[in-house]
Amino acid sequence: MRALRVVALGYLAVMLVVPLGVVAYKTFEPGLGAVWESITTPAAIHAFWLTVEVAAIAVPLNAVFGVVTALVLVRSDVRGKRLLEALIDLPFAISPVVVGLALVLLYGRTGWFADLPFQVIFSLPGIVLATVFVTLPFVVREVVPVLREVGDDQEQAAATLGASRAQTFRRITLPSIRWGLVYGVVLSTARAIGEFGAVSVVSGKVSGETETLTLLVEKRFTNFDLAGAYAASTLLALLALATLVAMTLLNRRKDPA
Amino acid sequence: MISVSSATKRYGDFAALDDVSIDVEPGSLTALLGPSGSGKSTLLRVIAGLEEPDAGAVVLEGRDVTYVHPQQRGVGFVFQHYAAFKHLTVRDNVAFGLQIRKRPKAEIAAKVDELLEVVGLSGFQRRYPSQLSGGQRQRMALARALAVEPKVLLLDEPFGALDANVRAELRAWLRRLHDEVHVTTVLVTHDQEEAMELADRIVLLNHGRVEQVGAPRELYDAPASDFVMGFLGPVARVQGGLVRPHDVAVLVEPDGDGAVEAQGRRGRHRLPAAAGTGVQRRVTQDSGSSASGCSSAGRLPAARSASVTCSTTPRRLERTAIHTCCSGAALPA
Amino acid sequence: MTGGALGLGVATMWLSLIVLLPLAAVVARSLDGGLEAFWDAVSSRQAVAALRFTLLISLAVTAINVVMGTLVAWVLVRDRFRGKRFVNALIDLPFALPTIVAGLTLLALYGDAIAYTRWAVLLALLFVTLPFVVRAVQPVLHELDREMEEAAHSLGASATTTFRRIILPNLIPAIISGAALAFARAVGEFGSVVLISGNVPFDTQVTAVYAYKQLESDNITGAAAVSVVLLLVSLLVLLGLRLLERRP
């Protein structure tokens, strides 16, 4: 048992802990002032707010869609729901590059929807679409098991007490799935903030316009601004750690046992 | 022969076993009986090697196995919730122990078929545990434990998860099986009826200690303590003492109003009936051969001096002296 | 039930608009130049080399994950040590950390030693796929009936025999499903390998990066064609998982 523990923890240390420490070290090596400067350049600030904006649009969309889909998958027995269930995980299994390419082929210069009145590719809508694509399954995947476990006894009880469907949803269903929903939202947000491949294909990477934080990291790295790349990375890593903390706390809420 | 001496096991402040010593005769069927938390399951698991005692020793057939891994003890263990190997068929479940022992294939096949026949599961060889009922799963688990020809068979509340009918059926079946196979068997149960019906000997445990050891009749008729008496059958309280309901007699005296008399563990208890109270009663002959019917409500007849066994609880009786002296337990109907 | 049908309609519309329609575009555009052009694009030497490398390294990554992920899950469920809750939380780090940061991190750590080699790709993929098997096996191991193991012990099975014949068979479905997800992720991974692999054709170039480069050099059909291959791999993995779940 002891040997197993050493092997397992050693593996995790090498794989997870050491790299994280190295980025933090590399970041603060040039000094705090330099770090502050490199994450407050106009390009960096714009990238930060763009990232927030994209997440703020994509995540609520997926939250609503996720709850509707979960309800369909668990509570109804309409035909065709098995197919929906099978396809819902698709974004998890697809390469981000393929996602980006698909959007370019659909909305780009030569795409099927090239004649829309507004620009999609190389602009905000494209980035949002890519982000919605890659984060689509999270909320569904978290809410479905909770709905299954809660069962529909309480909903039926509410119905016998005279509650309408909307009232039952708002006062019974939603409260019972809230922690699962929040958990899914946290995962979606983390992925939305961190998405690189799909966004990198559709954004065009125009500094100060369509450049998100992850794209900024890549650009700085390829422009040999290593310190700047590490600083932006640390910012993202801090967001990741916040996500982990939120997940751990929520996990305890989800199952208090 | 199983011998446990001075076994002690604590979980934090809780003493699951507190200096427990028992001897189990070879070939006998012994029941470890007690309320939940009495330490009976812990004792069984200590014998099996699934728990290690903090102190004390376990000797199986002359060999000290206190610190021997269950793997090497040669015991068969049957769990309350079957512990069926879900991913294996019935046949492979029963064959498991023999395969571990690297017996020849043909021998294993023959042995498995024979055992499934014994437990009434022939024809179920290819099924998975999920396709069996609870009773069938438990019989499969028994066959699995018996397959390795264990020196002792240990059963931990084996019928506890089954419904009443199946339980009674399996109980009778286990007794017959034991009479045929004669393997030393220790059974944990919290059901006194089960213990009385099945076991040659009962070890009654309470709070991690042995209260009494003996044949079922012994424990029932000569309980060593109020706890034993209370645990093994229905009791009524008469003047502070515990009595068996069938030992409660309503006495009719020519000159008086009668009385209630009961044979308790510490002698006779007697309580005169209040004058003028109406008693509805069922009179049986002393021989107990046949009921002579119920008389209507009224004073106790003062004619003959016969002792009548109070064997019913009519409505009116609830308000009489008999009720006040028999409170705390229902008389058997 | 009209509510169910309405919900299904909304969900399907959304899924189609966001996911299915773009994917259909990829498939359609890959065939723009006809089947022959598609085949040429897929079977070009560089594309085949990238695909072969991607599949092989993904298999290697999956194999390592099967062993290490099961081991980590085992230690997290069965072992007791200080700081276990912290370690447990840490497992999800690769899910939470942006892939580009992961790549940069590994580059900073192992830069001089392994950058732009196949080892670097292996390491990056191991990092991003670490949680899959662990998180799949953990709950199953947690729920596993301990009495099954005790029964095996009482029947004379040693600890290793019990693990091999009783525990492992019960974990296999979870291990496979975690491994399949890890494999799918590894095959399509882009962000963490794009910097550290160096993208050397016939050596460290993975298919996702190859497709990206094709797109950058305006070879739309070529990019779409290899993307269809990646898509097929994803679909096969998902299909396999579905079939596995159907089994009793």
Image (tube, grey):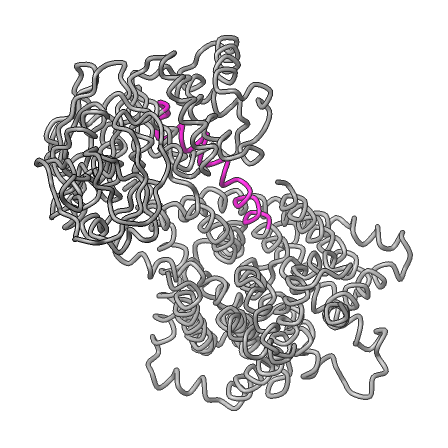
| Residue at the image position 75 percent from the left and 48 percent from the top | C45
Residue C186, image x, y percentages: 59, 53
| Count of number-bearing discs | 0
Task: Describe residue B161's horizontal placement relative to residue C227 as left or right.
Answer: left
- Work out which residue is located at the far right of the displayed protein and give it: C34
Q: Considering the whole magenta stretch, tell me its main secondary structure.
A: helix
Which range of residues does the magenta coloring cover?
C155-180
- Work out which residue is located at the far bottom of the displayed protein and give it: A42
**In which quadrant is the N terminus of chain B drawn?**
top left
Residue B207, image x, y percentages: 16, 43
**Which residue is more in the foreground, A235 or B234?**
B234
| Residue at the image position 10 percent from the left and 37 percent from the top | B268
Hey, which quadrant is residue A88 in on the image?
bottom right
Residue B278 visible in the displayed image: yes
Hey, which quadrant is residue B73 in on the image?
top left
Task: Describe residue C117's horizontal placement relative to residue C51 as left or right.
Answer: left
**In which quadrant is the C terminus of chain B drawn?**
top left
Residue A162, image x, y percentages: 61, 78
Residue A128, image x, y percentages: 66, 79
| Residue at the image position 14 percent from the left and 40 percent from the top | B226
Residue A221 visible in the displayed image: no
Task: Describe residue B152's horizontal placement relative to residue A99 as left or right.
Answer: left
Q: Is residue A38 above or below residue A188?
A: below
**Which residue is more in the foreground, A71 or B27?**
B27
Hey, which quadrant is residue A246 in on the image?
bottom left
Question: Is residue C101 within the magenta segment?
Answer: no
**Which residue is more in the foreground, A65 or B143?**
B143
